[in-house]
Amino acid sequence: MRDLKLPDQRHPEKAHRSDNAQPKKPDWIRVRAPGGDGYEATREIVRSHGLTTVCEEAGCPNVGECWSQGHATMMIMGEVCTRSCTFCNVATGKPPEALDVFEPGRVADAVTKLGLNHVVITSVDRDDIEDGGAEHFAQTIRAIRHRAPETTIEILTPDFIRCGPEALEKVVAARPDVFNHNLETVPGLYPEVRPGARYFHSLRLLQRVKELDPAMFTKSGIMVGLGEDRQAVMQVMDDMRAADVDFLTIGQYLQPTPKHHRVDRFVTPDEFASYEKAAFGKGFLMVSATPLTRSSYHAGDDFSRLRAARLAKLSSA
């Protein structure tokens, strides 16, 4: 039986890689250890429903803050990903089981018990499934709509790169409030950082969402500190705006283990503020650019700002 708590079994494809030194984190990205009544209550609901969260699987530094407020990002379709991105701490390999048909209902039940006004649903990549898990996403969205009709839904999807166009169409037809797909890094780093993906395919995916439903909010994010330069980040912003992406997130890459991609540098808060200013200048409705920014960090509050920004833009047109 595979033990995902052991690094060599969690990331067998990385076991042969030489170790990369893990530099000491600067003061501006230190966080408190998780704990407290709110954190424990959220963990109990997640555990009792047999759910997986990206908060834990990806080692998110914000898990203590978010869970203490009852906010958890559900990760559907199992805990083993078929990709082997060098930045990611989610377990990799061949998923051991078929999709759980009862999972959408359990996710919806957990959403109601957590009392979420806004929920983020993400997943592992499932290249072993014909539609990449698109129908499972759609079923999860529908289950939440049924159980918690007032809750707004944000999804963070795979790229469906091995699927036909109908896969994306299924997900968009289920009408999430926000469709997020992360570009993760600049195109020049894809072969090293995201070898199973293609930059322009991911960009086209985001553009296609808008073609299918022009009213749907789209969102994407990148990490910095992987070896990119400012010019490349600016080009990614321009590419996203050309695809009509509404919401941009930029956060600091943090190295999960010595076997993962090295941290090239820690980007300063002032640099993040500069990226945020530039992104708003390029026309994004919403931007979150801080060292601790992650796709679902403060997602509910940011969605409210995103919606308000669109209304303000329409009223001034």
Image (cartoon, helix red, strand yellow):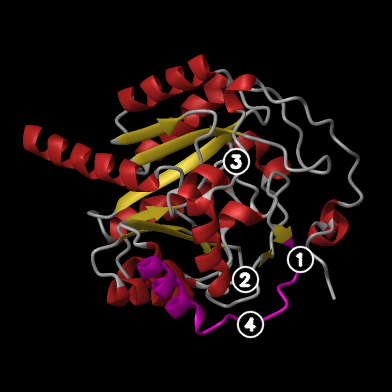
* Labelled pair 1, 4 in contact (Cβ < 8 Å): no
Q: Quadrant of residue 98?
A: bottom right
- Residue for point 69% across, 65% down: 82
- Residue for point 50% across, 60% down: 41
Around disc 3, counting alpha carbons within 10 Å, would you say few (fewer than 14), some (14 to 19), or many (20 or more)? many
> Residue type at mark 3?
Pro
> Residue type at mark 4?
Ala
> Residue type at mark 1?
Gly
Please give the residue where the numbered disc 1 appears in the rendered image: 93
Q: Position of residue 301 (x, y in %)?
A: 32, 43
Q: Position of residue 223 (x, y in %)?
A: 57, 35
- Look at discs 4 and 3 and give the one toward the viewer: 3
Left or right of 87 on screen, residue 221: left
- Residue for point 69% across, 25% down: 25
Q: Quick one: SS at disc 3? A: loop
Please give the residue where the numbered disc 3 appears in the rendered image: 61
Q: Distance between the residues labelled 4 and 2?
A: 9 Å
Number of marks present in the image shown: 4
Magenta stretch bounds: 92-113
Please give the residue where the numbered disc 4 appears in the rendered image: 98
Q: Quick one: SS at disc 4? A: loop
